[in-house]
Image (cartoon, helix red, strand yellow):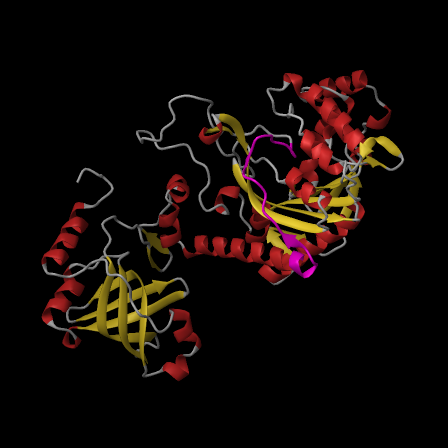
Amino acid sequence: MSFNEFDEDLLAKRERLIEQGLEPYPYSFQRTHVTQEIRDNEEELMGKTVSVAGRLFGHRDAGKLIFADLRDFSGRMQLMIRKNDFEDETWKVIKKTLDLGDSIGVTGEVFVTKMGELSISVKEFTLLGKTVVRVPIQKSKDDQTWFQLSDPETKYRERYLHWLTDPSSRDHMVVRAKTISAIRRFLEDRGFLEVTTPTLEILYGGAEARPFVTTINALSDQRAYMRISPELPLKRFIAGGFEKVFTICQNFRNEGIDRSHNPEFTMLEWYEAYTDYEYQMEQFETLVSQVAEQVCGTMKITYQGEEIDLTPPWNRITILGSLKEKGIDAENLSEEELQAEFKKRKIEPPKPFSWGHAVATLFEELVESELFQPTFVCDHPVEISPLTKAKRGNPRLVERFEPMIAGMEVGNSYSELTDPVEQLARFEAQKSYGADKEGIENHPIDYDFVKSIGCGMPPTGGVGLGVDRLIMLLADLHSIRDVIAFPMMRPKSGTEAEATDGEETPAEE
C-alpha cells in the first residue's frame, strides 16, 4: 500500500495474524472492570477474576515471564503474563506480534507482587486492535523520558496521538466536559430552557465579525453565512414569549488565529426577560465562581503561575473612568483631540474613526492587558454597541459590561435594546460606520429581527460567555488550541487539503 504512515513491520505482523486465522480487529470484548475500579476495590477483588481492556503501554520481557502495563481511560494496571498459562500459539502472538499501542483485553486474577504492585495474573488474552502506525509512547526512568511526542504541531494536528501518549491532555477534555455540564446545571436550576439556533443563516448579525460565506444549492445557490453569534435568534425567543433561554453552540468567524482566538469556537449565550445588565453582572460572577468550584474544587484558581480569585463580588470599572486614570479625559475630548492622543501615544487609530471607536480602542490598548483579576468593564460607547440600551443619564454610552480575567475578555452583556424604532436607526448607523471596513461591521440589516422586537419585547438582560476561554482559565492552559479538541491548522505541505491561495493564516502568538 502506498499510504506512507503505515509501518512495514507492523503491517507484516498484522498479515501474519490473519494468516494464522486470528482476527486482529474483533467486534467486542466483555470487560468487568476499569482499572481504577480495581484499585478502589482492591481488598474486595483480591484473588478474584476480572476482565479489563486498554492499550499496551509497557512491555518487560523476562523469557517465560512478561510484565506489561495496560492503560485504559481511568488509569494503569500491571499485567503478569506467564508462558505456562497459555498454549504455544497464543504465547507466540504475545511474544512476537505485540507492540506498544496495541489494544488488548485480558482476564485474570487480582494479586499483589512481592514489590507491592497491584497486578493481574493473566489467564486469557485477546488482541483487540493491532497497530499499523507507530505510536510514540514515552518511556520514563528516573528523570529521563524517551519517545515523547514533543512536536507541538503534531500534538494539534494529530490530536489522537497527543491523547494517547499524554494522559494530561485527556484531562483537559475532561475539564471541558465538566465545565459545560456545570454551566448547564446552573442555568437549568435557575429555570432556563436550552434552545437551538441556526448554524447557517441567510442574514448574519449579533457581533462585529467577518463571516464564513457559502451557498445553498437547494435554494438556487442562495448566499448564506455560518453563524457568527446566536444573539438575534435568541432574542426572537424572548420576543415570542419565552422568558429564560440559553444556548451553547459553535460560532464561526473568518478572522485571525492566536492564543485566544480560533475561527470556530464555543459560545454560551443566555437571555432573561425583565432583567438588566446590573442583575446579569451578579449572575455572571455567580455562574463562573460556582462552575470553578465544581470543576476545580475552589474559587481561587492558579493561572500561569498567578492566583485568580473568582469569589464574588468582582471589581467593576468604567471605560471612561479607566482612561481618565491614564490621563485621557475622553468624555470631554473631541474627535480631533482624540486623534492627537493616538498620535502622541503612537497607537494606530481605528477605522472607521468616531468618538466611540476611538475611546474603545484606547481602552483596549492602554488598560485591558492590566486586568488580571476578575473585572467588569462597564459602559461602552454607543457606536460600538448597536444592540444595547443607552446608559441611564448618558446617551453617549450604553449599559454593557465585558468581564475580563487574566487580560482576556471572557464575555459580553447588555441591557438589551428593545425599542424597535431606535434599533432600526442604530442598524442604519452601524451600516454607515462599516462602509469602509471590508464588511466586518457592515452587517446587512435584519428587518425581521426589528419586527420581532416591535411586537412588544420586554426588558431583557443578555449575556455571552466564551466557553473556550473559561476552560483555558480553569485548566490553566495558555492557548485556546489546548482546550479545543481539533483546532484550526494550516494543512500540511503536500496534502490534498493544502491551500493554494488566499490569505496567510497568522501564526499563534
Q: Is residue 24 left or right of residue 222?
A: left
Say if 6 sits above or below 100 in the image. above
Q: Where's residue 64, x and y in %?
A: 15, 71
Is 365 inside the magenta-drawn segment?
Answer: no
Q: Can residue 299 be seen here?
A: no
* In-front residue for pair 174/435: 435
User: Residue at horizontal 75%, vertical 28%?
Assistant: 424
Q: Which residues are magenta?
A: 187-207
User: Residue at horizontal 31%, vertical 31%?
Assistant: 495
Say if 47 sits above or below 107 in the image. below
Q: Where's residue 145, x and y in %?
A: 34, 53
Is 199 inside the magenta-drawn segment?
Answer: yes
* In-front residue for pair 249/259: 249
Say if 401 sits above or below 349 in the image. below
Give the image quarter of residue 187. bottom right
User: Residue at horizontal 40%, vertical 83%?
Assistant: 43
Give the image quarter of residue 466. top right
Say if 10 sits above or below 224 in the image. below
* In-front residue for pair 49/474: 49
Circle count: 0
Q: Main secondary structure of the magenta part?
A: loop
Q: Where's residue 357, x and y in %?
A: 73, 25
